[in-house]
């Protein structure tokens, strides 16, 4: 998984170089790629927001890889389980699901281990297992919600800091200074606001998307597990036989 986290880092670096290429092509202005990308600054707050943006995209890509149907409710696993259940190889099902990492296997395993206590106990164990794993997944994506709420605040902090710099220049000059003198402070304000929004918008959008995905996949995994243990329901054999 650590190797996958390098993907957004490389993508971000490539984007930086792509954006910087027009500035590198400007001859005689003495503006290098780093200065063009950061200019007119953003200062330490702007750099911090850029680093948070890289980390945020690493988290986003990891979530899209790890929270999907293929990892939560893999079809090959479900097919294998159904085949074992049809053959009444329940011990093999318990053994198989104990080592399989998907949410479906975890829910089903918890239910089957309670088979000796009746169908109601199986359903209760499965519901508790689903709730436990869902909570873990929601906590996992909560970091995106935190980033999405903090980033605009950092951008606003940079905006206030930039305005302080502007008024400090005016006070030092004793009159309205040259606009080029004020450009630095104004640049800090605008750049930090920009990066605050750049970080927050994708983070919050993906957070909402992932919450919906977790709810949908968890519900689907629970339904599939309940269908698998339906043969344990009292009266199921009679109704099938009738």
Image: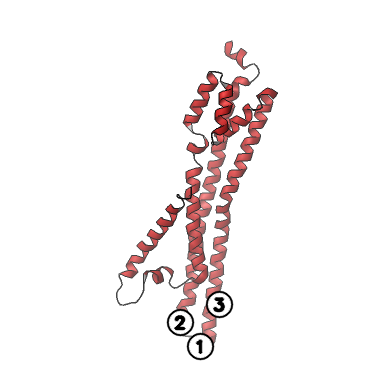
Quadrant location of residue 233? top right
Indicate the position of residue 31 as horizontal and vertical percent values. Answer: 36, 74
Q: Nearer the viewer, residue 9 or 95?
A: 95
Callout 3 environment at 10 Å: few (<14), some (14 to 19), or many (20+)?
A: some
Q: CA distance from mark 2 to mark 3?
A: 13 Å
| Residue 181: numbered disc | 2
**Disc 2, SS:** helix
- In what quadrant of the picture does the C terminus appear? top right
Indicate the position of residue 83 as horizontal and vertical percent values. Answer: 50, 22
Is residue 213 visible in this depiction of the protein? yes
Q: Vertically, is 104 above or below 50?
A: above
**Disc 1, SS:** helix
Indicate the position of residue 107 as horizontal and vertical percent values. Answer: 60, 33
Whether tag 2 and tag 1 are in contact, CB under 8 A, the answer is yes
At x 48% / y 75%, what residue is drawn? 186
- What residue is pinned by disc 3? 164
Callout 2 environment at 10 Å: few (<14), some (14 to 19), or many (20+)?
A: some
**Disc 3, SS:** helix
Is residue 227 visible in this depiction of the protein? no
Whether tag 3 and tag 1 are in contact, CB under 8 A, the answer is no
- What residue is pinned by disc 1? 173
| Residue 165: numbered disc | none
Q: Vertically, is 149 above or below 134?
A: below
């Amino acid at each position: 998984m650590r190797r996958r986290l390098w993907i957004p880092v490389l993508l971000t670096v490539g984007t930086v170089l792509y954006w910087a290429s027009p500035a590198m092509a400007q001859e005689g202005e003495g503006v290098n790629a780093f200065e063009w990308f950061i200019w007119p600054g953003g200062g330490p707050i702007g750099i911090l927001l850029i680093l948070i943006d890289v980390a945020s995209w690493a988290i986003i890509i990891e979530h899209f890889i790890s929270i999907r149907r293929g990892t939560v409710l893999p079809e090959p696993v479900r097919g294998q389980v159904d085949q074992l259940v049809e053959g009444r190889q329940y011990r093999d099902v318990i053994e198989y699901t104990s080592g399989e990492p998907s949410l479906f296997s975890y829910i089903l395993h918890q239910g089957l281990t309670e088979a000796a206590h009746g169908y109601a106990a199986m359903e209760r164990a499965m519901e508790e297992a689903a709730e436990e794993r869902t909570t873990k997944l929601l906590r996992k994506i909560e970091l995106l919600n935190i980033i999405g709420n903090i980033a605009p605040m950092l951008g606003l902090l940079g905006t206030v800091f930039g305005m302080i710099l502007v008024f400090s220049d005016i006070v030092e000059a004793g009159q309205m200074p040259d606009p080029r003198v004020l450009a630095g402070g104004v640049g800090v304000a605008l750049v930090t606001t920009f990066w605050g929004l750049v970080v927050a918008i994708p983070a919050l959008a993906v957070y909402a998307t992932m919450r919906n995905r977790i709810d949908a996949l968890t519900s689907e995994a629970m339904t599939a597990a309940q269908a698998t243990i339906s043969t344990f329901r009292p009266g199921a054999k009679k109704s099938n036989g009738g």
